[in-house]
Image (tube, rainbow, N blue to C red):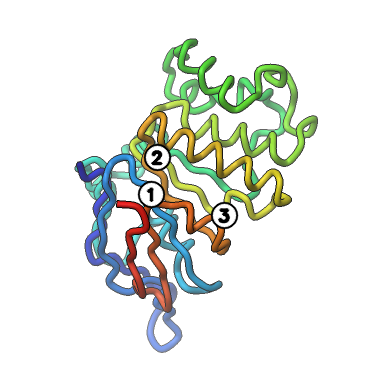
Amino acid sequence: MEILRIEHLSKLYGKGETAVRALDDVSFSVKKGEFVAIIGPSGSGKSTLLHLLGGVDRPTNGKVLVDNTDIYSLDETQLAIFRRRQIGLIYQFYNLIPVLTVEENITLPLLLDEQKVDKNHFDEIVKKLHLENRLHHLPNQLSGGQQQRVSIGRALINNPAIMLADEPTGNLDSKNSSEIIDLLKVFNKTYHQTLIVITHDERIALQADRIIAIEDGRIAKDEVIRP
């Protein structure tokens, strides 16, 4: 079952002779439950692609369909709501709210949506992330690895259609990097959570089901590793 489809996606920054084409007519689809790694050198367009998939930026041309919804046909308010409910975003630098506890950071998307927290779902996520004893801590009381676990919990709390991770281990040492990728794989396999990871780390990319290589704003390679 297809969960994500990208059609002729392009993004230009600037105008005229100084315009920079960050993405150039990119098309592909992702099946539900697939783990896709997107790789490419700095400036290749991979982070621009992730921002467009996540509804953070708007394309110059093309479509992004998440679970059959054309996200860029939505107005800003509708897009913000859709993004909060259907797209889980994980960043390199965690982006936690410093004055909120671990529990409050994880449940923030639900609170913003005025939804009740499903305690069983919350407890299950927290247990798998090994955060049971950190729920009342603030972000500055956590290690980098623990903070990234909180950001994973926040991304998962709404059972999103897709989870997008932008260099999720880029700010961590090798031990914490391995643990974070192992956790993402657990949620990918256990919950059939669709996972798209932007990475420059070949070791991480090789753990995915599929690798998409971006060069100069175009897809240079799209290879299935594990059918």
Q: Is residue 22 visible?
A: yes
**Residue located at (31% from left, 66% from top):** 60
| First along the sequence among labels 1 and 3 | 1
Which of the pair 87/191 is nearer the observer?
191
Q: In the image, which disc is placed on residue 167?
A: 3
Residue 176 vs 137, above or below: the answer is below
Q: CA distance from mark 1 to mark 3?
A: 18 Å
217 or 21, nearer to the observer: 217
The residue identified by callout 1 is 55
Query: Mark 1, residues whose alpha carbon is within 10 Å: few (<14), some, or many (≥20)?
Result: some
Q: Amino acid at mark 2?
A: Ile
Q: Nearer the viewer, mark 1 or mark 2?
A: 2
Q: Residues within 10 Å of mark 3 (few under 14, many from 20)?
A: some
State the SS at label 3: loop
- Residue corresponding to mark 2: 87
Q: Nearer the viewer, residue 226 or 188?
A: 226
- From the viewer's perspective, tell me whether residue 9 is left or right of residue 35: left
Query: Residue 107: horizontal and vertical position, in percent?
Result: 53, 23
Q: Position of residue 118 (x, y in %)?
A: 45, 13
Query: Above or below — where is 222 with respect to 130?
Result: below
Q: CA distance from mark 3 to mark 2?
A: 16 Å
Q: Are marks 3 and 2 in contact (CB under 8 Å)?
A: no
Residue at screen point 53% across, 73% down: 41
Task: Kindly report the distance in space between the C-alpha atoms of the residues bearing marks 1 and 2.
Answer: 8 Å
| Quarter occupied by residue 7 | bottom left
Residue at point 29%, 65% (across, down): 9
Residue 195 on image: x %, y %:
41, 44
Say left or right for 103 vs 165: right
Please report contact status of discs 1 and 2: CB closer than 8 Å, yes or no: yes
